[in-house]
Amino acid sequence: MSLVTLLPFIVLIGAMFLMTRSAKRKQQAAASMRNEMQPGTGVRTIGGMYATVKEINEDSVLLEIAPGVHAVYGKNAIGAVLDDAEYNRIVHGDTAIVPDDASSLTELDEEPKVDLGKHDTPETDADAASGEAAATSEDKADKADKADKKNDGEGEAK
């Protein structure tokens, strides 16, 4: 057998080795992350539920889902261990993160610029509502006129 005929098999075996190696690396990283859990740590389960670790056993974890509500999960069900800042931001809606760039704070304080399009002055809600009402009644009248003309034309043809 020549090297050319063996080359596809060698490449296939090499690819399989690399894929299993990366999968093992991911499993080891997940296991070490789960082993670093401490009571009081915020976690996200693989199902997307956020909870606080209350107790850690050999193969299971007691999670507090809501105040006073506890559930037992397998350690393999923990998808991510979150740091306190991220957990509080997601669960409690804390936005204590201050941007590094102070210019972004002034941009938020500015009033948004509105493109008025064809109009030179902005309409009030009352003006817009009366204009829409007038336009709708005009549209209805136009449709009624067209329907009458169509009906008149059909009556004459018979």
Image (cartoon, rainbow, N blue to C red):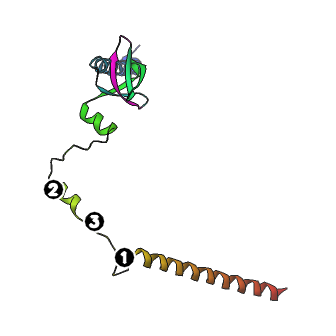
The quadrant of the picture occupied by the N terminus is top left
Of the image marks 3 and 1, the number of the one nearer the N terminus:
3
Indicate whether residue 147 is drawn in magenta: no
Q: Identify which amino acid the numbered label 3 is placed on.
A: Pro
- The residue singled out by tag 1 in the image is 117
Q: Residue furthest front?
A: 68
- The residue singled out by tag 2 in the image is 103
Instruction: Give how far apart the Cα atoms at labels 2 and 1 are.
Output: 29 Å
Of the image marks 2 and 1, the number of the one nearer the N terminus:
2
Give the quadrant of residue 65. Answer: top left
Give the quadrant of residue 141. Answer: bottom right
Q: Is residue 56 above or below residue 127?
A: above
Q: Identify which amino acid the numbered label 2 is placed on.
A: Ser
Closer mark to the observer between disc 3 and disc 1: 3
- The residue singled out by tag 3 in the image is 112
Instruction: Give how far apart the Cα atoms at labels 2 and 3 are.
Output: 16 Å
Mark 3 closeness class: few <14, some 14–19, many ≥20 residues within 10 Å: few
Q: Secondary structure at mark 1?
A: loop
Of the image marks 2 and 3, the number of the one nearer the N terminus:
2
**Residue range highlighted in magenta:** 48-59
Looking at the image, which is closer to me, 141 or 66? 66
Indicate whether residue 54 is drawn in magenta: yes
Instruction: Give how far apart the Cα atoms at labels 3 and 1 are.
Output: 15 Å
Q: CB atoms at circles 2 and 1 under 8 Å apart? A: no
Please report the residue visible at 35 percent of the width from the left and 75 percent of the height from the top: 116
Please report the residue visible at 50 percent of the width from the left and 77 percent of the height from the top: 132
Q: Is residue 37 above or below residue 120?
A: above
Please report the residue visible at 28 percent of the width from the left and 25 percent of the height from the top: 41
